Image (cartoon, rainbow, N blue to C red):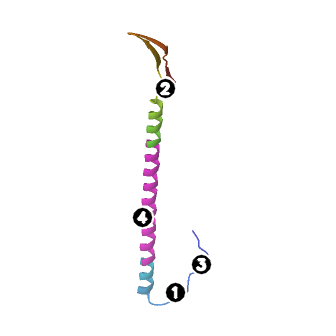
């Protein structure tokens, strides 16, 4: 990957240049490690989201909506006459 930046002229001793290269290498390794960790975290998030979504689908498949209408009746003495009684399942 290029950033468009120019490399400054090297000066100093060989030891200075080697130390600079070691520092660059260490920084690059840190970047690679961070990218690997982010990739693993993203994979975990995707797996968790898929698992939760599948659980929701399963819950909805087992969901049954029911509605019971109000029961109305008129009582005459000891007898009960039911005018309306419905149980509907949707």
Q: CA distance from mark 3 to mark 4?
A: 24 Å
Q: Which residue is located at x 46 percent, y 57 percent?
A: 39
Name the disc covering residue 10, or none: 1
Q: Are marks 3 and 4 in contact (CB under 8 Å)?
A: no
Crowding at dot 2, Cα within 10 Å, few <14 / some 14-19 / many 20+, comes out as few
Q: Magenta includes 44?
A: yes
Which of pointers 1 and 4 lies earlier in the amino acid sequence?
A: 1
Q: Which residue is mark 2?
A: 67
Magenta-tinted stretch: 23-51
Residue located at (56% from left, 81% from top): 7
Q: Quadrant of residue 33?
A: bottom left
Residue extending farthest to the right is 4
Q: Nearer the viewer, mark 1 or mark 4?
A: 4
Most prominent secondary structure in the magenta stretch? helix
Q: Earlier in the sequence, mark 1 or mark 3?
A: 3
Measured as percent of width and height from the top left, residue 57 is found at 48, 36
Residue at image mark 4: 33
Q: Looking at the image, is mark 2 or mark 3 nearer the viewer?
A: 2
Q: Which of the two discs, 4 and 2, sits closer to the camera?
A: 2
Question: In front here: 3 or 66?
Answer: 66
Residue 3 in the figure: left or right of residue 86 = right
């Amino acid at each position: 990957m290029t950033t468009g930046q120019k490399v400054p002229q090297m000066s100093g001793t060989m030891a200075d240049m080697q130390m600079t290269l070691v520092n660059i290498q260490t920084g690059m390794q840190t970047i690679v490690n961070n990218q690997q960790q982010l990739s693993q975290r993203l994979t975990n998030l995707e797996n968790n989201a898929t698992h939760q979504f599948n659980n929701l689908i399963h819950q909805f498949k087992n969901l049954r909506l029911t509605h019971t209408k109000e029961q109305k009746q008129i009582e005459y003495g000891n007898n009960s006459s039911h005018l309306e009684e419905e149980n509907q399942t949707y």
